[in-house]
Amino acid sequence: MSFPILTADEAADLIQDGQSIGFSGFTAAGSAKAVPFALAQKARREHAVGRPFKVGVLTGASTGKSLDGALAEAEAISFRAPYMANPTLRKQINSGQVKFVDMHLSTVPQNARYGYLGRIHWAVVEACDITAGGGIVLSTSVGASNTYMRLADKIIIELNTKHPVSLLGMHDIFEPQDPPARTEISIFSPSDRVGSPICIVDPKKIACVVNTYLEDEAGGFDEPTAVTDQIGQNVADFLAAEMKVGRIPSRFLPLQSGVGNIANAVLAALGQSTEIPAFEMYTEVLQDSVIPLLENGRCTFASTCALTLSPKAMQRLTRNIDYFKKRIILRPQEISNHPEIVRRLGIVSMNTAIEVDLGGNVNSTHVMGKTMMNGIGGSGDFTQNAYLSIFSCPSTAKNGKISAIVPLASHMDHSEHSVHIVVTEQGVADLRGKDPLERARLIIDNCAHPDYKQQLRDYLNLVAPGSHEPLSLSAGPAMHRQFIRNGDMRNIDWAEYR
């Protein structure tokens, strides 16, 4: 079956001002690249002659510089969901220039199907192959691509020959029925398959194919530090101790890990631990640190939504593709993050926080309560349904001027009812079965930086007597106010709150 072959510029010319586009991509892995970049150039041309040109952008999660980056720099985005990580786009969102809707990633495809996100005019999706019958073989991520292609009026395929056609067979494409016809999802271990290796679409909707040869734009990670290494070791030691007392089965449990330097450090520590058995992963992103774990058998299988790998790690995978196809499944985010499966498999979730308050509530999205960083991503999907939910972060930021442990979180993404364990380089606070005052004391004693311990204890002494929650609506934000005024959270005078 043949389709019109267009250049990226010709394909971009098909898209009109005000239209909504569902792009492939879950992180930079598998993101559409050529068409959004050409679309950004079109927007610049239109703006130069005084004509408006902006589009609504839906993706799986964050994307690469040729998508979010190029479109944001061209001021071509009117609406964005559900997650992003581009600095220019972040500024536009925080200034109100771009409307941004933050969503749990597992809910994005169904929200699109339910009509909550409006009409999707175009799906622009990267593939590594198109089968003779018109089936789409996705590249290094699934995200919400299968749903966007089904719902969109028209489809543009970026056929990226940088990714080998041998990726066929690594994907497991499955989309649940909508209520009231939805049935169970029959995944009982990370390696179970329930769907198809290809996306089946109506070939009449494919407007064109754009041939590309482009590497994923995955960014590198910082070198490990003493702080990230210690956080990783603290998590590994805690999980090993949980096994010894029988609260984690001796065969261990599947792991979910977030994105970033701390996540890499945690996985590295688990991989090196002689007390943790070989484990499986049921997660949304695989980073570089997982590839050697799969090669040496420390990780025996990984179910994911995206291969968020550096070019070097991706080459390592594709050179030995037959080995990795037996050990990796790529799923839609609706399945990789599905609450039903997370709870059934008994996932140990490990995510990062911006700040944690003394009640155990976690802020993972907004600095000082109002400035969006990236979004909630999939952390809530896993945290609310995990066998064991862990949040980790350095105890301080900005050279010690900000404490990650605060009296009252300035924004709350994950409540005390879902957060089991808090970890910093200082130690581990196990909040399970603890009342509010016990939680507060544990978090201060085990997780707060020494520069802030006494200040936090003084707050607790001020507010704890005579209430179930050790909370003051006036004194709770005092450390944030102190930072806004003086650039440093330390040296609070609690006397003014008595």
Image: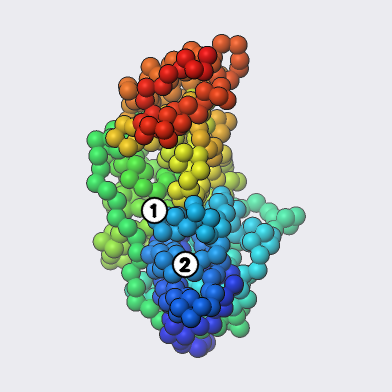
- Rendered location of residue 265, percent (x, y): 31, 41
Distance from Cα at disc 2 to Cα at disc 1: 31 Å
Residue that sits furthest to the right in the current view: 180
> Is 72 rendered above or below residue 274?
below
Q: Is residue 162 left or right of residue 206?
A: left
Disc 1 secondary structure class: strand
Q: Disc 1 residue type? A: Leu
The residue labelled by disc 2 is: 75
Residue that sits furthest to the top in the current view: 465
* Label whose residue precedes the other's in the sequence (2 or 1): 2
Q: Which residue is at a point 45% across and 44% down the rendered structure image?
A: 256
Mark 1 packing: few (<14 Cα in 10 Å), some, or many (20+)? many
Mark 2 packing: few (<14 Cα in 10 Å), some, or many (20+)? many
Count up the numbered dots: 2
Residue nearest the observer in this picture, 73 or 441: 73
- Rendered location of residue 230, percent (x, y): 29, 33
Q: Which residue is at a point 32% across and 22% down the rendered structure image?
A: 450
Q: Which mark is residue 154?
A: none
- Rendered location of residue 16, percent (x, y): 57, 78
Q: Which residue is at a point 24% across and 46% down the rendered structure image?
A: 223
Q: Disc 2 residue type? A: Glu
Q: Which of marks 2 and 1 is in front?
A: 2
Residue 221 appears in view: yes
The residue labelled by disc 1 is: 286
